[in-house]
Amino acid sequence: MTDPRPAPAGRRLAALPVPPTARAAVLLPRVARALDGSGDALLPVPADDPRESGRLTGALPPGSVVDDTVAMVVATSGTTGTPKGAMLPGPALVAGARATHGRLGGPGTWLLPLPPHHIAGMQILVRSVVAGTEPVIVDVTRGFDPEDIVAATRRMPVGRRYTSLVPTQLVKVLDHPGAVDALRTFDAILVGGAATPAALRERAEAAGLALVRTYGMSETCGGCVYDGVPLDGVRVRIAPGTSRIVLGGPVVAAGYLGAPGHPAFAEPGWFRTDDAGEFDDGVLTVTGRLDEAITTGGLTVVPQVVEAVLERVPGVRACAVVGLPDERLGRRVAVAIVPDTSPHAPGTPGAPGTPTLETLRSAVARELGPRAAPREMFVVDALPMRGIGKVDRWALHARLTGG
């Protein structure tokens, strides 16, 4: 007996197992069909990580019906551990790719050193489809090795060259002279996924690299603000009475899968971020995450603002600020630092040594006031990361508190 109910309108969501990066180019035909509407809507998942793939498909079930315009559902990394699926229309993805090429000087060949199941890596595949070019792949299955940048660059054709890195990869590149030489041949190197420390940016520019800082997220088809300036068609505003950044334009997602009426998309055509910032004279400055702010003794401290000061202190390679429980203050500001031991650091010989807590406190107090200064310092070999380059503050908090 046939089911008399009509089939639901829309496209079916299908999992797209993304192979290790070296074979990611095989995805291009399915990506192209998703973009033009002739194929399934796609949920990118890592083919070589069954646990993560299962977590994503459990939260964002394949077989779900989405609107006809939706080409992809991309999981957000999230700070809570629960993935949300940003429903990205094909026209939005294409608009982001075309706006990127327009800003950078025209279509070119892309180097892919990022996992394509994240939006930054997937956008390189989308841009390649839109440009009609074949991306050159860097295999990061076993981690990022800057030596692979050298070999991959040799395989790139003549013409405009682009790539996208996260700040942790850029640090490794700058410590590898061969990789620096290779990337000097690129017309633009997008850096996003996390804030790029000013000292790191200055060092890259001094090395002759054409750095472009990007800001965006899965909900905006990746980076949509370059060096503080919105891409063509992208709109930026600050929510009245707050410092919250709100983004609009053709690159905005159609909402979250299975979450109609989500407040982040309450205003059609706009996405309400969890980021704080300022937008003056057409330039956006991102100051930090609203959901990571620390309330200490009645004062609100944004970790990224403090980190921007600390990253300029000699001897600090990387740092992360968190709030730890405090009986008197509620939360006290603490910082974990990775000391800078590389040869480029100022001082003799090699690096200036690990800074003291008092040095860090003085630097912050001078710029932000004593209440924002860290009261405790931890020295670590590396900061825990999530996604493709964001500091995992929750994991760091658990490590520092023994939780």
Image (spheres, grey):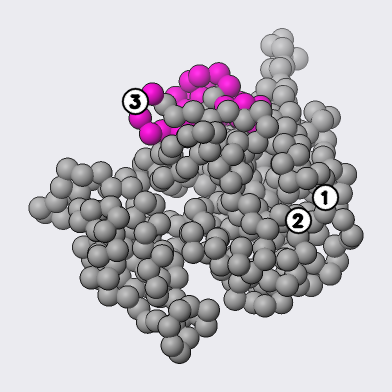
Mark sitting earlier along the chain (2/1): 1
Residue 79: say if magenta: no
Q: Position of residue 159 (x, y in %)?
A: 87, 56
Type of the residue with mark 2: Asp
Label 2 Cα neighbours within 10 Å, binned few <14 / some 14-19 / many ≥20: some
Q: Provide the residue designation for mark 2.
A: 187
Residue 89 against residue 208 in the figure, above or below? above
Classify residue 315 by image quadrant: bottom left
Left or right position of 243 against 269: left
Instruction: Give the overall secondary structure of the magenta segment.
Output: loop
Classify residue 163 by image quadrant: bottom right
Residue 76 visible? The answer is: yes
Q: In the rendered structure, are the residues bearing label 2 and label 1 in contact, judged by CB atoms less than 8 Å apart?
A: yes
Relative to the observer, which residue lies in front, 214 or 60?
Answer: 214
Q: Provide the residue designation for mark 1.
A: 108
Classify residue 6 by image quadrant: top right
